[in-house]
Image (tube, grey):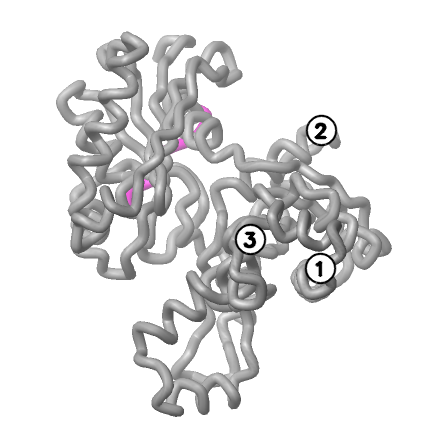
Amino acid sequence: MQQRAYILSINPGNTSTKFGVFVGEGREVREVLVRTVRHSPADLERYPKVVDQLEFRLQAVTGALADVAFNLDHLAAVAGRGGLLKPLAGGTYRVNEAMLADLWEARRGEHASNLGALMAHRLAEPLSIPSFIVDPVSVDEMDDVARLSGLPDLPRHSLSHALNMKAVARQVAARMGRHYREVNFVVAHLGSGISVVPHRRGRMVDVNNALNEGPFSPERTGTLPATELVRLCYSGRYTEREMLRKVAGEGGMYAYLGTKDLEEAVSRARSGDTEADLVIRAMAYQVAKEIGAMAAVLAGEVDRIVLTGAMAHSDYFIDHIIPRVSFIAPVVVVPGEDELPSLAQGAYRVLLGEEEAMDY
């Protein structure tokens, strides 16, 4: 393998497709270009299922690359975001037929991230280069004791922002002069969904399922009072589809304030809106409680608490979390999401031979 390799990373989201070209040189990955293509609701509503968007999304990426005159023949690999797959250990996986079949049929649910491997494969195959996914949302490294919920019919499942959390954890460990496999962190990804995860020596040993557990977020309810939830489901007021949308999509901050935009909520709070202030503080309060719970998972042996994700840019929000948890361990804030370079780094580690790609 040459020491210089161009890698295309693709991260499909609900209303956008983010992609970037990165070049690996030596042991480092450097950004060449990054783009975000926005998709209007009208464009996406034409497609009954997420996978039906495949050609539309591919054209958006190839068209944008053509606009900057990037030649796909220069690529050594394509890495896509992993979707709703079967439980997997963390790492880099080759895209294969079994993976494509699971995603095409949405066997574990519909989500825009399901398009990541499909797009990577479609772009890589004609070029005779490998396609990969890295640390998909279904990464499952949970201890057995964490899988019991209290009801055998409802085992706990691992679903989280694994890609960004593992990448940020590696960065923070490196700054400490340590390896990710040598440290204990509690990492909180603060985005449209919130994942709070204890990382013990390189493994995510527990997870609040970001779709339906843990703190409420800008659009998700998180954990709800179980008895009242059951009664609401059987009240006749809502259909199953409506209830699912309430839990993930129209819950959390949106249900209280009518907005999913934290900056708008903060602006309202700063202008004297006491309800907006209360909701933001409550969301931060729940994040802090979850961090405390996950610190208990690590028996208090926590080297760092790491706050990341888009909402980590907001001092107003973060400043309500840090005072509640800083007694546990030093708090490091790494705002934003490094998912595109993280995908490229995972693929490049395989190309260099530093890591072996796994089979799905």
From the image, state whether disc 2 or disc 1 is nearer to you. Answer: 1
Give the magenta-colored segment's residue range: 354-360
Q: What's under tag 1, amino acid-wise?
A: Asp
Q: Nearer the viewer, residue 18 or 271?
A: 271
| Number of on-image labels | 3
* In contact (CB < 8 Å): disc 3 and disc 1: no
Quarter of the image for residue 54 reads top left
Q: What's under tag 3, amino acid-wise?
A: Met
In the displayed structure, would residue 159 be above or below residue 4? below
| Element assignment for label 1 | loop
Q: Nearer the viewer, residue 97 or 275?
A: 275
Q: What's under tag 2, amino acid-wise?
A: Arg
Task: Answer whether residue 357 is visible to the viewer in this image.
Answer: no
Q: Which residue is most to the left? A: 126
In the displayed structure, would residue 339 be above or below residue 344? below
Residue 187, magenta (yes or no): no
Indicate the position of residue 59 as horizontal and vertical percent values: 20, 28
From the image, state whether disc 3 or disc 1 is nearer to you. Answer: 1
* In contact (CB < 8 Å): disc 2 and disc 1: no
Residue indicated by mark 3? 204
Indicate the position of residue 306 as horizontal and vertical percent values: 68, 45
User: Which residue is rendered at x = 51% and y = 78% of the image?
Assistant: 149
User: Which residue is rendered at x = 66% and y = 39% of the image?
Assistant: 313
For residue 175, which numbered disc appears in the image? 2
Indicate the position of residue 45 as horizontal and vertical percent values: 22, 50
| Element assignment for label 2 | helix
| Marks 2/3: CA–CA distance | 20 Å
Q: Nearer the viewer, residue 62 or 132?
A: 62
Task: Answer whether residue 153 is visible to the viewer in this image.
Answer: yes
Q: Choose the circle earlier in sequence order: 2 or 1.
A: 2
| Element assignment for label 3 | strand
For residue 160, which numbered disc appears in the image? none
